[in-house]
Amino acid sequence: MPIRITLDDVLAAKNMKAKQVAAIIEVSETHLSLFRTGKVRGVRFSTLAKLCAALDCQPGDLIAYTRAAADL
Amino acid sequence: MPIRITLDDVLAAKNMKAKQVAAIIEVSETHLSLFRTGKVRGVRFSTLAKLCAALDCQPGDLIAYTRAAADL
DNA sequence: TTGATACTTTATCTAAAAGTTAAATTTATG
DNA sequence: CATAAATTTAACTTTTAGATAAAGTATCAA
């Protein structure tokens, strides 16, 4: 799938644990885990905004697009 | 709301009409209009991917986060 | 003024999925 | 080993993306 979640990179860079972030933004650890590992098919902007706020980053830092080989 | 849709900037830069893009990615003009003008509360990654593919851009080019004044 | 093109808006509807809770499991890591 | 962090599955509720339809606004050129 061409959309990759790069949240883990930001967590690593900021030295934060997923658990912390889940607590801060008030999203279940379960869901954050699913999100982080690319197992959800979309986001609500409210959630995205909370992530950006908590991690002081932009949506582009969390979500990347990679052209599928077929589309090159 | 802290998430802003900046798709229009990309359209302008690429000299594309919303209508064209809607046709290319097979999303209704109605929905694309709602999306462009910030009237939806989320996106499916499948849609985001199609937009990125059609416009040859990254999610970060389409969605921006602005810290709310209260959060500064 | 008329007609074509682009875009918006409102409303109704359905299918999809975000996000929850709970509970068990699996990694780390000290 | 022990324990904290992360993952996975499953059952469930609630939200809403995105579709369709239909009427409306704006612009521009003939």
Image (cartoon, coloured by chain):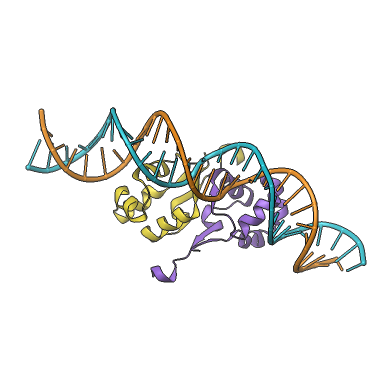
Chain colours: A purple, B yellow, C orange, D cyan
Viewer-side residue, B66 vs B31: B31
Relative to A2, residue B3 above or below: above
Residue A52 image point, x, y percent: 58, 49
Residue A44 image point, x, y percent: 55, 45
Asked which quadrant contains residue A12, the reply is bottom right
Give the residue displayed 39% in from the left and 68% down from the top. Answer: A71
Viewer-side residue, A1 vs A62: A1
Relative to C29, residue C23 above or below: above
Residue A35 image point, x, y percent: 61, 55
Asked whether, in this view, residue A45 is left or right of residue B53, the answer is right
Viewer-side residue, B50 vs A54: B50
Residue D4 image point, x, y percent: 82, 57
Asked whether, in this view, residue C26 is left or right of residue A37, the answer is right
Asked whether, in this view, residue D26 is left or right of residue C15, the answer is left
Relative to B19, residue D22 above or below: above
Asked which quadrant contains residue C10, the reply is top left
Relative to B4, residue A36 above or below: below
Give the residue displayed 51% in from the left and 56% down from the top. Answer: A60
Give the residue displayed 65% in from the left and 51% down from the top. Answer: A31
Viewer-side residue, B8 vs D11: D11
Asked whether, in this view, residue B28 is left or right of residue B41, the answer is left
Give the number of callouts: 0
Image quarter where the C terminus of chain A lies is bottom left
